[in-house]
Image (cartoon, grey):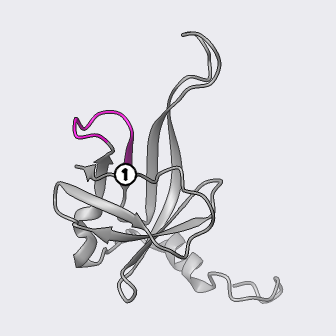
Amino acid sequence: KDPSGPAGRGLGSVTDLLKKAKTVVYTVDDEIINLMGTWYYDETKEGKSINFQKDGICYYRYYQYFGEGTFSSLNGWVSQKGVWNYSATNKILSITMNGEVTYYYLIENLTTTNVKLVLRENNPAGKSMIFSDSILYK
């Protein structure tokens, strides 16, 4: 940290460490290791999906439809980047998608092929773009 810079904790020497590191190893809590990878919102495993990566990044893929007709340049598959974090103490998964506030989920019935993310009671108003009442499939 540059002592002549602004006050505050920031990332301190962690930033310097990551710049000089030859490799960075991310670990995921054993109880949610099966959450890593791509999850589909449909049993056919096609279309809309969310991908959780070990580095705390997630990507939501969905079909965007704006405008009339087949030839709208705004229609098509798009990805939205977000960040996730899991608290092993509280058993809560927090997900923040770009342009959204953070939403908190409980993970139900996590297996190697199925999971259900349930919104906690203490969440912001509305629902996140990634929310689904149904089971996700891997």
- The residue sitting at 44% across, 41% down in the picture is 61
Q: Is residue 83 above or below residue 113?
A: below
Mark 1 Cα-neighbour bin, 10 Å: few <14, some 14–19, many ≥20: some
- The residue sitting at 35% across, 33% down in the picture is 47
Q: Is residue 25 magenta?
A: no
Element type where label 1 sits in the image = strand
67 vs 27, left or right, is right
Identify which amino acid the numbered label 1 is placed on.
Asn
User: Which secondary structure dominates the residues rendered in magenta?
Assistant: loop
Q: Is residue 49 magenta?
A: yes
- The residue sitting at 82% across, 83% down in the picture is 6
- Residue 130 percent location from the top left of the image: 47, 51
Residue pointed to by mark 1 = 51
Total labels: the figure holds 1
Residue range corresponding to the magenta coloring: 42-51
Which image quarter holds the N terminus?
Answer: bottom right
- Residue 90 percent location from the top left of the image: 40, 86
Q: Is residue 70 above or below residue 28?
A: above
